[in-house]
Image (cartoon, rainbow, N blue to C red):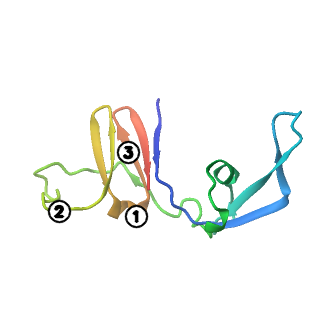
Amino acid sequence: MQILFLFIIGSVFSLACSDEETMTGLNSADSSAVKIITITDQDGYDWDITHAVQRYHWDPDLFRFGLGIGRIKPINNPQFFLPGDMGYPDSLDTFMVLGVEIEGDPRAYALSILKSREIVNDQFGEHPVAVAY
């Protein structure tokens, strides 16, 4: 079974970093230590953001807090409207969507809904897909 993931990430956490928390490289000849940078959510769970800071230059000071695991319920197996269905948008309606097409099967997820739910667990044929905003 193939699993596909699409992520647009925007999260806020508190920063925690300790001088004692270090990670040594896998190469034993390299004795340099890398400081582990973590963020803590509202439930007290620590998340390692070292890779994001070092590789992608994320500013750890921009993280403040997070809701914690399981606080925002995902949309599971969403229902879609087709042209002619009650609730299908009028051709004059405008709104932003996150679009996904896999093997010729297109889907559009309204950002107005994703702003409050953030995750959609959907199925494209045999492919389970997690769409995150």
Q: Quadrant of residue 47?
A: bottom right
Q: Are marks 2 and 1 in contact (CB under 8 Å)?
A: no
Residue 45 visible within the image: no
Q: Which residue is mark 3?
A: 122
Residue that sits furthest to the top in the current view: 1
Q: Which mark is residue 127?
A: none
Where is residue 108? Give x, y as percent: 29, 50
Residue drawn at point x = 77 percent, y = 54 percent: 36
In this rendering, would 109 be left or right of 131?
left
Q: Which residue is mark 2?
A: 93
Residue that sits furthest to the front in the current view: 57
Q: Secondary structure at mark 3?
A: strand
Q: Are marks 2 and 3 in contact (CB under 8 Å)?
A: no
Residue that sits furthest to the left in the current view: 84
* Along the line of sight, the residue nearer the viewer: 96 or 1: 96
Q: Amino acid at mark 3?
A: Asp
In this rendering, would 68 be left or right of 101?
right
Where is residue 83? Give x, y as percent: 13, 49
Q: Quadrant of residue 122?
A: top left
Q: Tell which tag, 3 or 1, sits nearer the viewer.
A: 1
Q: Amino acid at mark 1?
A: Lys
Q: Tell which tag, 2 or 1, sits nearer the viewer.
A: 2
Q: Secondary structure at mark 2?
A: loop
Residue drawn at point x = 73 percent, y = 57 percent: 37
For marks 3 and 1, the one nearer the N-term is 1
- Say how many tags the image has: 3
Could you tell me how far apart the alpha carbons at marks 3 and 1 are, in whole angstroms? Answer: 17 Å
Residue 6 visible within the image: yes
Q: Amino acid at mark 2?
A: Asp
Q: Which residue is mark 1?
A: 115
